[in-house]
Amino acid sequence: MSSEETQGQSKQNTSDRALLVQTLGALDESDGGHRAWNGRDARYCPAQPDATAIIEHPGGSKVSTPVVVYNISSSGAGLATKLYLHRLTPITLQLVTHDGSIVPAQGKVQWCEYYENGMHRTGVRFDTKIKPRAFVDPEVWLRESNGDADSLWSVSRKALHIEEDELEANAVAMLTKNANIKCVNESTMGRASDLVQSNSFDIVFLSDTMSDGNAVESVSHLRTIGYSGPIFVLTAGCHTKDESFEGLGVNAVLPKPVQLVSMMSALRDLFEQGEELSGTQPIFSSLTESQCSTESLKKYLELTTKCARKLDEVLKTNDLNVALKLCNSLHSSGAGYGYNELSKTAQDVIQKLNASNSVRESAVQIRSLIRLLSRLDSRAPEESEHEDRSQNNDQEQAA
């Protein structure tokens, strides 16, 4: 066969496979009878449908066979197979990520039925849930993945971007505006460290091309000085998350030039998991109006604001006894007013103060406590509006 014939055959196979993926995917969506194998998890069309399945037969023998993955979710996958597979047959899929890496996923066959032309339509449930984003084209993921993006980005957030190049810094600031994130840029680690210790940030973006230290050292330094929130490393190509940043809590490594799809997709994955305690969003009391009035909460918050100012003074005077007294007071009262995070954070500071007998050695923990105190608020606006309406209704009924 000539090279032209080979290329033509390859294009035909690709076209046939794409049609098979599209047809079976649509068939699954319209067939409610098979939804049990995949629960209620959202399904996506994989970027790389070709995969290898290792099937374990009774008695322990294994056979490897090519399959076509026509949809994938966190809990399972739909396959086109040439073999008929019995229910509960153990199977390992060698899935291909959107960037070409191979990732194994173990599971069991849930159902299998004949489709046409010697092909079977097969459903597999994974033993352990996976993250389907890795196997879906980033643009498709951003467009189709679950979550109300409008609601997610309605929250205003603040980021620190550590980058020397002004053009790059401006580009990232422009991209993050799409996620309602305001970027503060610093061009040196020294000034960035001062900002981290005196302010709260929802996320830190760190360039790996800084001249005053490599990215691994910079991430480690941020953790050492007390920043515990999300970190995205923006890389020129010399780092990968798994190899370089293992154990340092880096949430994502994005290649330069950073593009909108990859940035928004990574941010949504991050914030859909929940807010970080080290962020900038208000921390509201968990108590209802009937359990503790809003007026009582506001009076308590006035006192905690005074405590924050005194703790800031303690950092300068190095008065251990005053620091312990303030932290014990916050620890004892926080949970009582519905601020469990406050009690826990104050307890962590107390333990550090007792272990070190030094305010200076506990400065990182004390600054974290001060930042948390600045985020305390009484109740969410919608809760306050509901309480106002309830009070008005009560007054009208009484009248």
Image (tube, helix red, strand yellow):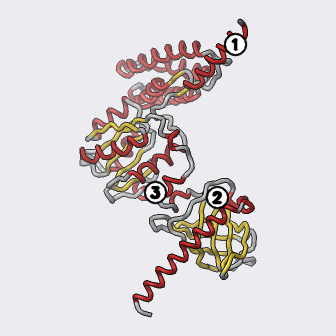
If you read the primary sequence from the N terminus, does the residue marked by circle 1 or circle 3 appear first? Answer: 3
Amino acid bearing label 1: Asp
Would you place residue 363 above or below residue 311 in this image? below
Q: In the depicted view, which residue is nearer to us: 284 or 149? A: 149
CA distance for labels 1 and 3: 51 Å
Which secondary structure lies at badge 1?
Answer: helix
If you read the primary sequence from the N terminus, does the residue marked by circle 2 or circle 1 appear first? Answer: 2
Say which residue appears at 40% left-offset and 39% top-offset. Answer: 224
Give the numbered dot on residue 75: 2
Q: Which quadrant is home to the N terminus?
A: bottom left
Say which residue appears at 72% left-offset and 11% top-offset. Answer: 397
Amino acid bearing label 2: Ser
* Residue named by callout 3: 139
Which secondary structure lies at badge 2?
Answer: loop
* Residue named by callout 1: 394
CA distance for labels 3 and 2: 21 Å
If you read the primary sequence from the N terminus, does the residue marked by circle 3 or circle 2 appear first? Answer: 2
Q: Residues within 10 Å of mark 3 (few under 14, many from 20)?
A: few
Q: In the depicted view, which residue is nearer to us: 397 or 50? A: 397
Which secondary structure lies at badge 3?
Answer: helix
Amino acid bearing label 3: Glu
Q: In the depicted view, which residue is nearer to us: 133 or 186? A: 133
CA distance for labels 2 and 1: 49 Å
Q: Nearer the viewer, mark 3 or mark 2?
A: 3
Residue 88: % across, % down:
74, 68
Q: Residues within 10 Å of mark 2 (few under 14, many from 20)?
A: many
